[in-house]
Image (spheres, rainbow, N blue to C red):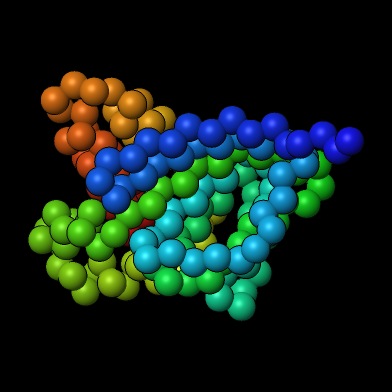
Amino acid sequence: MRKRGYRKMLVIETDKFRVTKEKRDQNYKMKVSHFHPYHELYYLNSGTCNMFVDHNIYKLHEGSLVLVPAGEIHKTNYPENGRHERYCINFTDRDLDWISEVTGNELIQENLQTTVLSIPDRRRDYVSGILERLIYESEAKDPVSHGFTRLFFQELFLYLI
C-alpha cells in the first residue's frame, strides 16, 4: 500500500477571493494542468518547484513569487524531495479596483501578465508577514477582518508593482 502525501491545508474564502497556505511532503503530485477564471498569486515559502505556465517552464526556489493571469493553463511539479510550503491567493480584477483607482487601470493591466519574481532575502520576511496577516485576518470573524484582508492583499499587490 502506497503512503499518501502529507497535506496540511488552510483555505480561507471571502467572496471569490481566496487565500491558501499548504505544506506538502514528497508524495504530492499535481496530476493535470489546469486553468481558472481568476488570477493566481503563488508564493513558494520553502522547497523547490517547477511551474509550467502557458508553454513556459520556470524553476522556482524559496522566495519565488508567480502571478498567473486568469485563463492561463498552468501546473506545478515538485522535484527532489518534494517537501514544500506555499501560499496561493486567488483574486479577480474586482479585487484590484481600489489600486486601479489610485494608479490607473493601465498599470494594473501591465502587472496582470505572467510574472515571476525572486523576492530578495532581505524582503522575504516582509512578504511572508503580509501573507500571514492575510491568513490571520481571513480566519477572524470580527466586523473589520474582511477590510483588513483586502487591505493586506492590496499592500502586497502594490509592493509587487
Foreground pick, 153 / 71: 71
Which quadrant: the C terminus? bottom left
- The residue at the point 78 percent across, 52 percent down is 79
Query: From the viewer's perspective, is 151 left or right of 37?
Result: left
Residue 108 in the image, given as x and y percentages of width and height = 26, 66
- The residue at the point 38 percent across, 61 percent down is 39
Which quadrant: the N terminus? top right
Foreground pick, 53 / 128: 53
Q: Look at the image and tell me whether residue 21 can be seen.
A: yes
Query: From the viewer's perspective, is 160 left or right of 56?
Result: left
Query: From the viewer's perspective, is 85 left or right of 31?
Result: left
- The residue at the point 65 percent across, 49 percent down is 61
The image quadrant that residue 152 belongs to is top left
37 up-or-down from 62: above or below:
below
The image quadrant that residue 103 belongs to is bottom left
Spot the residue most to the left.
101
Foreground pick, 127 / 23: 23
- The residue at the point 40 percent across, 48 percent down is 89
Residue 154 in the image, given as x and y percentages of width and height = 25, 47
Residue 12 in the image, given as x and y percentages of width and height = 37, 36
114 up-or-down from 46: above or below:
below
